[in-house]
Amino acid sequence: MLSGGPGSGKGTQCTKIVNNFGFKHLSAGELLRREIASNSEYGAMILNTIKEGKIVPSEVTVKLIQREMESSDSRRFLIDGFPRTEENRIAFENITGAEPDLVIFFDCPQEEMVKRVLNRNEGRVDDNIVTIKKRLIVFEALNLPVINYYSKRGKLYTVTV
Ligand code: AMP
């Protein structure tokens, strides 16, 4: 699994890891955006949550990840943007019965993350200064307990960006 704030480089580095090591890449944010685009029953709720920079309910996110894992031929997954909270982590363990072998954390200064998100021009509804500030508050508040959990279990690898 790979964790980091908005704009810390998760997506960019995942592409490189996948090209070099052959994992199946699953991005939590990307799966949620795809769900919005497919007009599913949760689409409107997910869109509102993302616009607000908040965390989508864990059960919804984990079910999307689980569906992708079950329908893939691969047995080696790189899950990006997950787990973002302790609730995410616990829901994943309960629903899938699995745990990550390794969690990579991209530790990036806030001003660098803001600069990158504002410059990336991907047309995302949440890449504006108002939503970014909310995303950073959510990230700072909820990420640390998950990082500490994996650190204590010897599964955390921190990359200073
Ligand atoms: P990202 O593409 O990783 O920047 O995520 C964009 C947005 O999707 C986040 O601000 C959240 O609203 C939502 N999101 C992404 N990953 C998760 C997750 N693991 N749990 C809940 N919400 C998520």
Image (cartoon, rainbow, N blue to C red):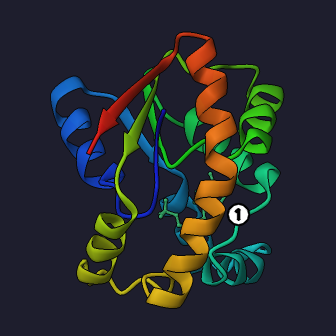
Residue 48 position in % (x across, y down): 71, 84
Residue at the location (67% across, 82% down)?
52
State whether residue 27 is above or below residue 17: below
Residue at the location (57% across, 34% down)?
69
Position of residue 28 in the picture relative to residue 76 (left or right): right
- The foreground one among 140 and 13 is 140
Residue tagged 1: 55
Residue at the location (62% across, 84% down)?
51
Residue 133 position in % (x across, y down): 53, 78
Q: Residue furthest top?
A: 154
View quadrant of ligand 1: bottom right
Give the SS element for disc 1. loop
- The foreground one among 137 and 13 is 137
Residue 32 position in % (x across, y down): 59, 64
Viewer can see residue 84: no
Position of residue 55 in the picture relative to residue 112 (left or right): right
**Residue 66 occupies which quadrant of the picture?**
top right
Mark 1: C-beta under 8 Å from nearest atom of ligand 1: yes
State whether residue 143 is above or below residue 29: above
